[in-house]
Image (cartoon, rainbow, N blue to C red):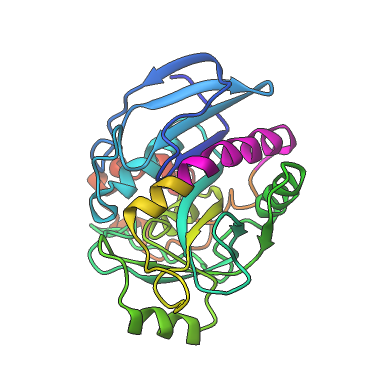
Amino acid sequence: MAEAAIGVIGGSGLYAMAELAEVQEVALDTPFGRPSAPYVLGTLSGKRLAFLPRHGRGHVLTPGEIPFRANIYGFKQLGCQWLISVSAVGSLKEEIRPGDIVIPDQFIDLTKNRPSTFFGGGIVAHVSMADPVCGRLSALLVQAARRAGATVHAGGTYVCIEGPQFSSRAESFRYRDWRASVIGMTNMPEAKLAREAEMSYATIALATDYDCWHEEEEAVSVEAVVALIKRNAALAQAIIRETVPAIGGTSPYAGSLATAIITDPAHISKEARERLRLLVGKYLA
């Protein structure tokens, strides 16, 4: 199977990666079903990269319908160690203006109906999520965003809601009380699954609006979001293009599961071992 060390998850407005050479398409099956779409593999700045539109081709999947486990497992099957997520978000702070870029370093997960772990079914593991993104990869994205001419905010908290509805005004004010920076619908459980898959994960959050808390701005609408995200898609690709050459070596999270599996190996069934062989095989030999 073709391999790529770097993965890119495209969000609203970013459905393809320009400037890829030696392009090929790979459709995968996983123990968790099929990913959102076939992966597009190609070479960028001399490095192999795998791209996946999380909402599927044509944006046909709601946030709650995205097969997050299949998507992340598929990247793992392709050999990815570094995962860059691109997401449209609403701003919860005055200083984060529509068009700005945020590279969050924390998440608050308010999703309700999404499977959020590869584990269960006879095998239990608890990974640390104290620092849910890779500091090394995030720093590279911040530097690349500045070189690309973006207004970038380093750090901040991303509130992930279930959707697909936007938040109420009361909810928006509550998230501001939490001092959160941005609000979106797709980075959870993505970040949790990436950690379980021992991959470095970081987000390019593209601010498209002020959610609905800002009394001097119109409440968020799909029309406004789409218009701005289309303009920002080129900027996101420029940031990725600037970042890829600097990515190298082994992910600092390559051993995340080494001390996370709590189930006695003697009690792990053959079926459970086979289902998660790609993730835990080296620890259960």
Asked which quadrant contains residue 153, the reply is: bottom right
Between residue 57 and residue 28, name the one nearer to us: 57
**Where does the C terminus fall, quadrant-wise?**
top left
- Left or right: where 33 falls relative to 261: left
Residue 36 percent across, percent down from the top left: 30, 38
Between residue 5 and residue 96, name the one nearer to us: 96
- From this view, report whether residue 2 is shown above or below residue 285: above
Q: Is residue 120 magenta?
A: no
- From this view, report whether residue 23 is shown above or below residue 16: above
Residue 58 percent across, percent down from the top left: 29, 34
Residue 135 percent across, percent down from the top left: 67, 58
- From this view, report whether residue 129 is shown above or below residue 87: below
Q: Which residues are magenta?
A: 229-250
**x 43%, y 48%: residue:** 284
**Where does the N terminus fall, quadrant-wise?**
top left
- Left or right: where 101 falls relative to 35: right
Between residue 97 and residue 184, name the one nearer to us: 97
Residue 266 percent across, percent down from the top left: 33, 56
**x 52%, y 67%: residue:** 128
- From this view, report whether residue 247 is shown above or below residue 185: above
Q: Is residue 249 magenta?
A: yes
**Principal SS element in the magenta part?**
helix
- Left or right: where 205 falls relative to 144: left
Mark yes or no: residue 248 visible. Answer: no
Mark yes or no: residue 94 visible. Answer: yes
